[in-house]
Image: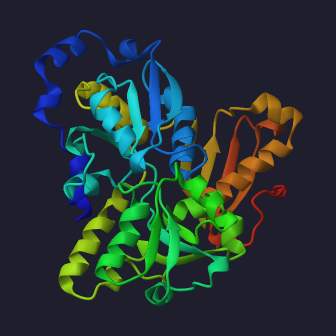
Amino acid sequence: MARLVLTLFTVLPLAALVAPAQAQSAAQSVADFYRGKTITMAVGTSPGGDYDLRMRMVGRYLGKYIPGNPTIVATNMPGAGQMLVANWLANVAPKDGTAIVALSQNMAVHQATGASGVRYDVRQFHWIGNTTDTPNVINAWHTTGIHTIQDVMQRELVVGATGTASGSFLYPYALNQLVGTKFKIVTGYPGGNDINLAMERGEVGGRGSNSWASWKSTRPQWLAEKKVIVLVQVGVKRNPELPDVPTLQDMAKNDADRQVLIFISADTAISRPLVTSAGVPRERVEALRGVYEGEDPFMEAEEVSGGFRLIEHNCPFLNVALERPALCSLTVSLLSRLLGFEVVREERFQSGDGRCSFRVLMDKPRAPDAPPFQRERKS
């Protein structure tokens, strides 16, 4: 099922490879085309959420790896549960490889179910890559008294959502219809960060969806303090980190409902995808995908006993770090949060090593209550 959803993005229709585009692109190399150009990188949420943060993190470095080194400009286009930006990519954005969207993974399911407002066809988009395959989760806020999904079978839980095209609406709605939960879904929030603020204010009692990876990287203190109660996970199988949390399909009452819930869970295989528009010449699409597939001249990884080593050959803030060594501790803390394991620096530019290297200790998971920032210990 996950393969079927992925195919919606990877099929390259013949109409997108028309002869005029091929003839024009053949006369100009990818590097020549992108040199001096600006790529608009858009996301359908407000600033501060997981989609936005991932887009900006990737966009910060993307230009270095695309031939011609174009400038990357990030922009937010919230609206209609991220459907607004999907419609923009299909109907307004240039079709030459200078528009990239951090697309909601739910757009394929939304189209397949015949939802209103769809003016895109995900089969026309060119899939570049995705940043994670983590499950999504539905959560309650700690003040609600809701502790399990069974509690929501007995009493109402108000959850925030961006729009009806988003997983934050689709997942709790499906459970209401097929399982009998009592989610009250409040839509209209521009992005996930806005829903987080609404939970803190007591405006809603949970989120209809957020990725598990996002909770770990953006709100680890909330997990450590048990402010976020994970009720159900969305994926084709249980995540090893959430062995006791049921999936949507675990809740099904019959096989037909189970198949439906598996279908709407399958898009986690392309979680947080980056796509570009139809009509982009094949060689430019391949260059954009090469950002994910090619070797990184600035960072490499090698396996070592008990884990692996990350080697950084080019520090983006070396001059500042020489004056403010504490900044390097931030790098170690950030790597540990993103990877979920303890990280120890072994080499550093400041010591004359000519590079920075970090050992990731796979046998030492990061403590759930670890502070988001701490000074690195000497190796």
Q: Is any atom of residue 304 visible in this view?
A: no
How is the rendered protein coloured?
Answer: rainbow
What is the quadrant of the C terminus in the image? bottom right
Task: From the viewer's side, name the closer residue of 269 and 322.
Answer: 269
Q: Is residue 27 left or right of residue 354?
A: left
What is the quadrant of the N terminus in the image? bottom left
Q: Position of residue 372 (x, y in %)?
A: 75, 60
* Above or below: residue 113 compared with residue 229: above
* Above or below: residue 206 compared with residue 286: below
Residue at 29% of width from left, 66% of height from top?
A: 264
Task: From the viewer's side, name the closer residue of 183 and 305.
Answer: 183
Q: Is residue 278 left or right of residue 171?
A: left
Q: Position of residue 239 (x, y in %)?
A: 45, 74
Task: From the viewer's side, name the closer residue of 208 and 278.
Answer: 208
Q: Position of residue 134 (x, y in %)?
A: 45, 63
Q: Is residue 178 left or right of residue 156?
A: left
